[in-house]
Image (tube, rainbow, N blue to C red):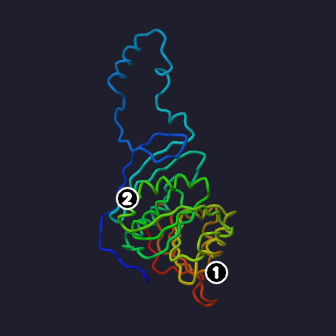
Amino acid sequence: MGGYVRRPPDTPAPHVTRSVISASAKMAAPMETWGGETGTEDEEEEEADEDGAESLPLSAVFPRDTELFSDTFPELKRFRFCGRVLRIAQHHGPRLGMAAAVWDGALCLCRFFEEQRMDFSGRTVIELGAGTGIVGILAAMLGGDVTLTDLPLALEQLRTNTELNAAAVAASRGRVRVQALPWGRALGSIPHSYDVVLGADVVYDPRCFPALLDTLLQLCGPRSVAFLSCGMRPQLGTAGFFWELLPVHFCVRLLRHHKDSDVGLYRVTRRRDSNGCSPIEQHGEQET
């Protein structure tokens, strides 16, 4: 990859472990739990006494786990890429919707960083529609100066995950900041040109395609490179975004296509002139 320093080989395939975190009305940094029994001996004795009672208290009838009655179902997962362990909280529920989860497109980008031994040291990086922020946080762990962006409702989850991984980012001399960025609007305080633009599963709603294209045009300078990874979703016209809309302004190269998940990974750069590149290059495409 032109302009990037390759790191020495680190670890084998990504490893994921899972643990559940307790729900709360506010998305504070979650406490990690490892399963198993959490009740004390006194509580177990009280429950035994209640078994013989004719009328049971509500606590004996209804589950103690308040998550069952919560609007969100948070969980904390660990991911391992590039020799780094990422702790990512996902607050599943109607409030965040699709922004709550780590999607296949994000894992595809993280694996790509690992395969290519990417080093973002000295690079400015922005992630669009970051959701959990896993891709941008990994880029920061690889030395990048990273800005995670999404709609305002997703920023608290991004801040939580930034805090969960702050020590690992600092140890790599990376940096992470969180900012709101609705697509299709003026960038405001956000710079107009980044070295690297990242997007994982951001191409899913045809109504947002023009706004996403406008934002990419504002963020990508002549030397910028964007890596966009997403499920192709034929019913939503995802391929049309890459093959019809983007090539008007960008050179588009398909780097990976994962058959099992139907996820495509594209490298996108600004066109220098009308003859600067073919509408879409498929050199280096890999079916996996």
Residue picked out by circle 2: 167
Which sits earlier in the primary sequence, circle 2 or circle 1?
A: 2
Image coordinates of residue 261 in percent, x first then y, are 48, 60
The amino acid sitting under disc 2 is: Ala
Please determine whether, in this image, residue 118 is positioned above or below residue 21. below
Q: Nearer the viewer, residue 180 or 128?
A: 180
Q: How many marks?
A: 2
Mark 2 and mark 1 in contact? Answer it, CB < 8 Å.
Answer: no
Which class describes the residues within 10 Å of circle 2: few (<14), some (14-19), or many (20+)?
few
Gap between marks 2 and 1, in whole Å?
39 Å
Image coordinates of residue 48 in percent, x first then y, are 36, 16
Q: Nearer the viewer, residue 86 or 254?
A: 86
Mark 1: which secondary structure? loop
Image coordinates of residue 54 in percent, x first then y, are 46, 8
Give me the residue at 46% from left, 50% from top.
89
Give me the residue at 51% from left, 76% from top.
267
Image coordinates of residue 138 in percent, x first then y, are 42, 64
Give me the residue at 36% from left, 38% from top.
35
Q: Is residue 3 found left or right of 182 in the rendered image?
A: left
Which class describes the residues within 10 Å of circle 1: few (<14), some (14-19), or many (20+)?
some
The amino acid sitting under disc 1 is: His
* Quarter of image, res 243: bottom right
Q: Residue furthest top?
A: 54
Quarter containing the C terminus: bottom left
In front of the other: label 2 or label 1? Answer: 2
Mark 2: which secondary structure? helix
Give me the residue at 62% from left, 63% from top.
181
Q: Nearer the viewer, residue 200 or 186?
A: 186
Please determine whether, in this image, residue 168 is positioned above or below residue 100. below
Q: Which mark is residue 249?
A: 1
Q: Nearer the viewer, residue 71 or 252?
A: 71
